[in-house]
């Protein structure tokens, strides 16, 4: 039986002064660069080889990586990134890599060369099929100059 890790989450990013100055076609590539490269089971071997060699990739499993969708709408007042993944061949022992990626993304938002976007909200959950636990990760931006992102991870029993 295969081991799977299921991931879902959301990032809500602010910094309205910067977003108002840059339309979607300019800001979305910046967002994608910070998040990293993705891959799915639908891609061919050549794409997989490129992804495997990438220095800036989203964590993945045997059949693909965590995926994401970026939304920038007037009603949202910022950018929302929704992400999800079903990572085959990844288990509890691999959850730290996912948490490290998530924290790294949040830190990059705060500390890019434009002064940071501000992480308004960051939440991720990780559920591994080889564990009876659910990990919930929250990153908070204290919105104070030179203050690091506050990262908390809580492990709770999963409902079976």
Image: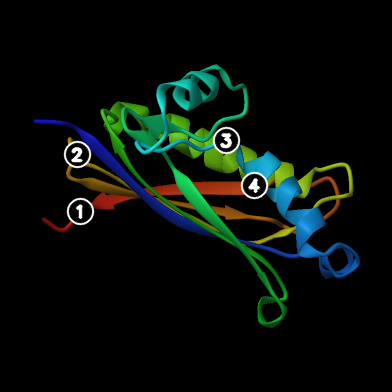
Residue, disc 4 = 106
> Is tag 4's residue or tag 1's residue first in the polypeptide sequence?
4
Residue 111 is left or right of residue 49, and the answer is right
Q: Residue furthest bottom?
A: 75
Do the residues bearing badges 1 and 2 touch, measured as CB atoms within 8 Å? yes
Do the residues bearing badges 4 and 1 touch, measured as CB atoms within 8 Å? no
Residue, disc 1 = 158
* Crowd band around label 3 with a 10 angstrom C-alpha radius: few (<14), some (14–19), many (20+): many
> Is tag 1's residue or tag 2's residue first in the polypeptide sequence?
2
Q: Label 2, secondary structure: give it.
A: loop
Q: Which residue does the image show at 17% across and 44% down from the upper left?
A: 132
Disc 3/disc 1 C-alpha distance (Å): 30 Å
> Is tag 3's residue or tag 2's residue first in the polypeptide sequence?
3
Do the residues bearing badges 3 and 1 touch, measured as CB atoms within 8 Å? no
Residue 75 is left or right of residue 61, and the answer is right
Disc 1/disc 2 C-alpha distance (Å): 8 Å
Horizontal and vertical percent position of residue 76: 66, 77
Residue, disc 3 = 37
Q: Nearer the viewer, mark 4 or mark 1?
A: 4
Residue 73 is left or right of residue 87, and the answer is right
């Amino acid at each position: 039986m295969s081991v799977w890790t299921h991931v879902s989450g959301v990032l809500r990013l602010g910094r309205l002064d910067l977003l108002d100055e840059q339309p979607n076609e300019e800001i979305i590539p910046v967002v994608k660069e910070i998040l990293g490269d993705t891959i799915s089971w639908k891609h061919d071997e050549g794409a997989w080889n490129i992804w495997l060699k990438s220095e800036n990739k989203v964590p993945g499993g045997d059949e693909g990586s965590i995926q994401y969708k970026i939304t920038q709408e007037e009603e949202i007042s910022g950018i929302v990134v929704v992400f999800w993944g079903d990572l085959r061949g990844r288990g509890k022992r691999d959850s730290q890599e996912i948490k490290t990626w998530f924290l790294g993304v949040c830190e990059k938002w705060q500390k890019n060369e434009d002064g940071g976007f501000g992480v308004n909200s960051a939440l991720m959950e990780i559920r591994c099929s080889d564990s009876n636990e659910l990990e919930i990760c929250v990153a908070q931006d204290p919105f104070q100059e030179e203050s690091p992102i506050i990262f908390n991870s809580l492990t709770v029993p999963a409902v079976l």
